[in-house]
Image (spheres, coloured by chain):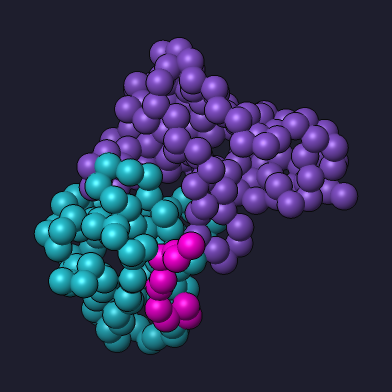
Chain colours: A purple, B cyan
Amino acid sequence: TQLLEQSPQFLSIQEGENLTVYCNSSSVFSSLQWYRQEPGEGPVLLVTVVTGGEVKKLKRLTFQFGDARKDSSLHITAAQPGDTGLYLCAEGGGGADGLTFGKGTHLIIQP
Amino acid sequence: AAGVIQSPRHLIKEKRETATLKCYPIPRHDTVYWYQQGPGQDPQFLISFYEKMQSDKGSIPDRFSAQQFSDYHSELNMSSLELGDSALYFCASSKEGQPQHFGDGTRLSIL
């Protein structure tokens, strides 16, 4: 089973600042998903990256997939309180396979 | 757009009782997945079904069983409940090979 390491585990910053969180593995990812989860709710899919070196943008969120497909990052520009949540990276899910999640980054954006 | 529907949203049981959780996937999705998320933990994959057949198996205890019905809804049956079974249980659905979309979960509390 592939182990995903996410860093930092906790991050608290002021509104308007920029931040980057990371997801790493010792093995190559077949594909990688980023999810955001709020307390008491299910994870919400943000993006799927498949190709090494791929960059995807979702408004103020920029997702990068490493060239070797062993790491990924999520960069948030001008963070807002609504960005607060648990950011999870996940691998797998090919066919009908289950996902393996990282432990997540708990992000708090203070007004 | 229609999302994954889970019922009940909250369930309280006592030790050694049984529980049944239900999941209604997004229309035209043919694959369902079950996950367990303990307090402060990442979601752990339990089991998945594709076209009503078990597809992938994760860390599902022998006391739990699941099935997918002809209308594609799924049920997770849990017996001999233990205190450690207290968790959020998520169902996700997808078209085969596509990203998984999660419901808002069932919060199971064992007294």
Pinpoint residue B16: horizontal percent, then vertical percent: 29, 84
Residue B84 in view (yes/no): no
Which image quadrant is residue A91 in? top left
- In this view, the residue farthest toward the top is A67
The location of residue B82, given as percent across then percent down, is: 34, 75
Q: Position of residue B88 (x, y in %)?
A: 45, 67
| Image quarter in which the N terminus of chain A is found | top left
Q: Nearer the viewer, residue A56 or B105?
A: A56
Up-down: is A61 above or below B77? Answer: above
Query: For the view shown, which residue lies furthest in the left direction?
Result: B53
**Residue at the (48%, 80%) spot, across then down:** B10
Closer to us: B25 or B111: B25
What number of labels is visible? 0
Q: Is residue B74 above or below residue A34?
A: below
Q: Residue B50's x, y, as percent? A: 18, 55
Residue A105 visible to the viewer:
yes
**What's the magenta region?**
B1-10
In-image side of A81 versus A90 (left or right):
right
Vertical placement of B105 versus B18: above or below? above
Residue beneath the point at 65% across and 51% down: A85
The residue lying at 32 percent from left, 38 percent from top is: A92
User: Is B8 included in the stretch rendered in magenta?
Assistant: yes
State the residue in front, A72 or A9.
A72
* In-front residue for pair A38/A2: A38
Q: Is residue A36 left or right of residue A29?
A: right
Instruction: Answer whether residue A74 is magenta in the image.
Output: no
Left or right: residue A94 versus residue B55 is right
For the stretch drawn in magenta, the main secondary structure is loop
| Residue at image coords 33%, 32% | A2
